[in-house]
Image: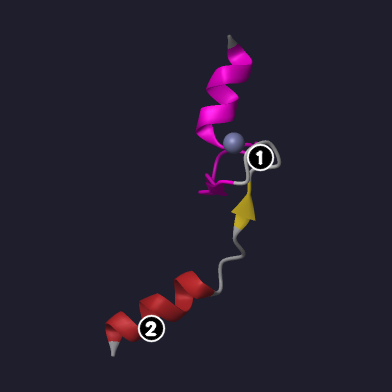
Amino acid sequence: MQMKKSIEFFNNIPAKHCPECGDHIIEHAESFLMECDRCLSRRED
Ligand SMILES: [Zn+2]
C-alpha cells in the first residue's frame, strides 16, 4: 500500500518539459530554471 501511495504522489507532480529540446525536466526544489541540465550547460558555454 505504501508503494501505491508513493506512485500516486509522483503522478500528481506536473511534468515539465524543456522548451529547448523537449526532454523531461526534474524540477529542483531550489531552482526556478525552465530548461534541462543539458541545455543549461550548453547555454553557459
Ligand atoms: Zn533541454
Residue at position x 51%, y 49% from top?
26
Q: Residue 8 location in percent, x, y?
A: 45, 80
Which quarter of the image is occupied by the N terminus? bottom left
Residue at position x 63%, y 36% from top?
35
Q: Amino acid at mark 1?
A: Phe
Q: Amino acid at mark 2?
A: Lys
* Rendered-image quarter of ligand 1: top right
Please rate how many residues cluster around mark 1, counting C-alpha atoms within 10 Å: few if below 14, some from 14 to 19, many from 20: few
Quick one: 21 or 24, which is closer to the camera? 21
Determine whether 27 is above or below 2 in the image: above
Farthest residue toward the right?
A: 19
Farthest residue toward the top?
A: 45
Quick one: 36 or 31, which is closer to the camera? 36
Q: Find out if the beta carbon at label 2 lies less than 8 Å from the nearest ligand 1 atom.
A: no
Farthest residue toward the bottom?
A: 1
Kindly identify which residue carries mark 1. Answer: 32
Residue 29 colored in magenta in the image = yes
